[in-house]
Image: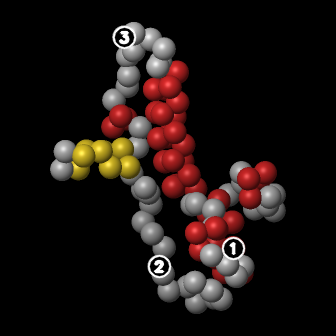
Amino acid sequence: MKSLYDRSDFGGNLDALQAHLFGNVKGDKHCLPPTEDAFQLHLCRALHHLALCKQAHLSQPTYAAVTDFCTRLAHGKLVATMMLKEAKSTELKHAKYC
């Protein structure tokens, strides 16, 4: 994380970094780093994709269930789990920009 967002002063804590940047930096909210929860879930889904790619050369690969990798079935379709923690209140008192 340190090299990705070039901020070592937050000790690798994405939640703290996101809160700091949201409250203190003017800019596009889409440029904010993800929360730690969302990042871990994304890594889980990426791990599943990597496992699929590593077996692509096999004629009879054995795949783990996709629902074991941060996705779920909803109405017959796979849906990514985007977060497990409850979202913070949108009414931040000290936020300068939104």
- Per the rendering, the mark at residue 89 is 2
Looking at the picture, how far across and down is residue 56, in whole percent? 46, 19
Element type at mark 3: loop
In this orientation, does residue 11 appear?
no
- Per the rendering, the mark at residue 49 is none
Q: Is residue 87 left or right of residue 76?
A: right
The image quadrant that residue 16 belongs to is: bottom right
Q: Sequence order check: which comes first, mark 1 or mark 3?
A: 1
The reply to whether discs 3 and 2 touch (Cβ–Cβ < 8 Å) is no
Up-down relation of residue 75 to residue 52 (above or below):
below
Q: Is residue 83 left or right of residue 27?
A: left
The image quadrant that residue 18 belongs to is: bottom right
Up-down relation of residue 55 to residue 44 (above or below):
above
The residue identified by callout 1 is 21
- Per the model, the C-alpha gap separating discs 1 and 3 is 47 Å
- Per the model, the C-alpha gap separating discs 3 and 2 is 48 Å
Give the residue displayed 47% in from the left and 41% down from the top.
Answer: 45
Looking at the picture, how far across and down is residue 6, in whole percent? 80, 58
Element type at mark 1: helix
Up-down relation of residue 68 to residue 34 (above or below):
above
Give the residue displayed 49% in from the left and 48% down from the top.
Answer: 41
Frontmost residue, 87 versus 76: 76
The residue identified by callout 3 is 60
**1 vs 2, front mark:** 1
Q: How many marks?
A: 3
Element type at mark 2: loop
Q: Residue furthest left?
A: 75
Looking at the picture, how far across and down is residue 7, in whole percent? 79, 61
**Which three-letter amino acid code belongs to the residue tagged 3?**
Gln
Q: Residue furthest top?
A: 59
- Per the model, the C-alpha gap separating discs 1 and 2 is 16 Å
**Which three-letter amino acid code belongs to the residue tagged 1?**
Leu
